[in-house]
């Protein structure tokens, strides 16, 4: 803890610079008095360990705001901080990743760990570098405390390749594991993808769980790039026992760490991507698979637990229309009861705020070219039909919001050399299915 107090992570420094009114990153005087340190933080931050660090609400999302003509497949990951009252502050946004100069690949589906120290995200850099489909993703993890760089817009935090897969979610509350969807057989090509979307599942997609630290140790020990190449308990297929024709994707870990909710499609049914997706839940060890929705002709995707574990928010297609709405499952007398929150327009990839009072999602908005904006919707029970508030106004794509917390520590900043983006990994050998 003493060593931690002698420095500050790059995001912590950026946050202080932003909170103190700087539009660009600048040096910050170290706080030696915990009370002074706490007074510089938003009221929404939670002070921990006698003032040694704080957990502050933040939103990680993908955007093409620095090059609006690009698509979401070539977006970067950004971090949006909060105002004093905890609501998102669009003016306090910083870029976390830097794509290749050709701008042919990108990152998405970033998720902050429960302790605010790490971020796991998708990248198609490896697939694009080896002439594979740009809809194939690999998972990377970034330690947000690794960098001391203050001047460069991209942290020099090390981005570590984990495995081929997409849409990771951290185990809660320990943050030691991630659940994600990946091919059962390990075979990836344009022909094996279920659809042409960023982070698309394969036709044999299953839900896997990985111990992140164990994966990194295995990679170093055996000199492999993908830890699925080495058999062991560091990676486990949770839905291996289900039919191989089912496409399992979009897992989300419950706040108490006991359950995982996910989407499953019957790949043998016609138009399975639009009319036959349902929400399922299982124990964190893969047992006790339970179907929560039974719309049959509808479509459900991207389930996400509320912070208190009593509600499950998801995208829902209702009434035979193409556009997605937002629905929520509430636990009532031991049964899950569905409520539709929105009725018109397109509402995509929702995420709860850490206190469960707000939802952030993305939707098309008016503008030149492809315009997708982050939208906030209050769900704290203080209004009947809550108005939507647009959070991003920059042209381009702003998508895949994930709300979480950022760990900020006090200390004297250190400036190092600018970062170099992690190179594309070599082609991933096809592992045998487990």
Image: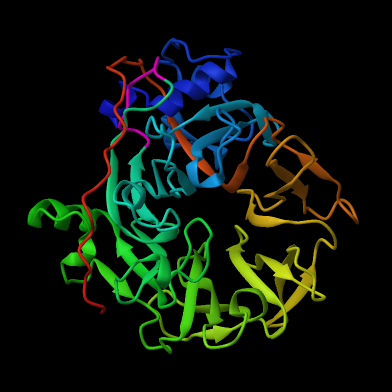
Q: x%, y% of residue 208?
A: 36, 70
Residue in the foreground of this view, choosing between 410 and 420: 420
Q: Main secondary structure of the magenta part?
A: loop
From the viewer's perspective, tell me whether residue 24 is left or right of residue 429: right
For the C terminus, the quadrant is: bottom left
Q: Is residue 171 visible?
A: no
Q: x%, y% of residue 302?
A: 59, 64
Q: x%, y% of residue 162?
A: 28, 54
Which residues are the magenta region?
A: 144-152
Residue 129 position (above or below residue 276): above
Residue 112 position (above or below residue 419): below
Q: Is residue 32 magenta?
A: no
Farthest residue toward the right? 384
Q: Is residue 149 magenta?
A: yes
From the viewer's perspective, tell me whether residue 162 is left or right of residue 387: left
Residue 412 position (above or below residue 42): above
Residue drawn where x is 44% and y is 35% of the image: 103
């Amino acid at each position: 803890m003493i060593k931690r107090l002698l420095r500050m992570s790059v995001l912590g420094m950026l946050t202080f610079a932003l909170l103190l009114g700087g539009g660009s990153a600048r040096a910050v005087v170290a706080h030696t008095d915990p009370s002074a340190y706490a007074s510089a933080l938003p009221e929404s931050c939670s002070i921990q360990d006698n003032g040694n660090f704080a957990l502050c609400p933040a939103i990680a999302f993908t955007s093409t705001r620095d090059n609006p003509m690009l698509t979401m497949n070539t977006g970067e990951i950004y971090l949006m901080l909060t105002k004093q009252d905890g609501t998102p502050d669009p003016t306090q946004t910083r870029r976390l990743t830097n794509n290749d100069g050709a701008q042919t690949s990108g990152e998405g589906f970033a998720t902050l760990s429960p302790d605010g120290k790490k971020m796991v995200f998708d990248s198609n850099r490896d697939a694009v570098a080896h002439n594979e489909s740009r809809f194939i993703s690999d998972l990377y993890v970034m330690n947000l405390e690794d960098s001391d760089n203050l001047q460069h817009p991209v942290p020099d935090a090390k981005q570590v390749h984990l495995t081929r897969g997409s849409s990771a979610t951290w185990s809660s509350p320990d943050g030691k594991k991630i659940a994600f969807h990946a091919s059962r057989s390990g075979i990836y090509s344009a022909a094996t993808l279920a659809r042409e979307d960023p982070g698309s599942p394969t036709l044999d997609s299953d839900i896997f769980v990985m111990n992140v630290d164990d994966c990194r140790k295995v990679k170093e020990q055996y000199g492999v790039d993908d830890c699925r190449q080495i058999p062991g308990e560091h990676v486990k297929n949770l839905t291996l026992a289900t039919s191989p024709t089912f496409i399992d994707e979009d897992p989300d870990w419950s706040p108490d760490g006991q359950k995982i909710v996910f989407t499953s499609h019957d790949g043998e049914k016609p138009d399975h991507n639009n009319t036959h997706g349902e929400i399922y839940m299982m124990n964190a060890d893969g047992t006790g698979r339970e179907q929560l929705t039974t719309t049959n002709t509808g479509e459900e995707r991207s389930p996400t637990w509320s912070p208190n574990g009593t509600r499950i928010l998801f995208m829902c297609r209702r009434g035979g229309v193409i556009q997605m709405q937002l629905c929520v499952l509430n636990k009532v007398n031991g049964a899950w009861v569905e409520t539709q929150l929105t009725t018109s327009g397109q509402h995509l990839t929702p995420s709860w705020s850490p206190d469960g009072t707000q939802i952030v999602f993305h939707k098309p908005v008016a503008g030149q070219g492809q315009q997708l904006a982050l939208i906030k919707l209050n769900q704290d029970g203080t209004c009947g039909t809550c108005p939507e508030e647009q959070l991003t106004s920059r042209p381009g794509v702003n998508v895949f919001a994930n709300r979480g917390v950022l760990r900020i520590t006090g200390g004297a900043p250190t400036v190092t050399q600018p970062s170099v983006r992690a190179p594309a990994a070599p082609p991933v050998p096809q592992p045998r299915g487990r």
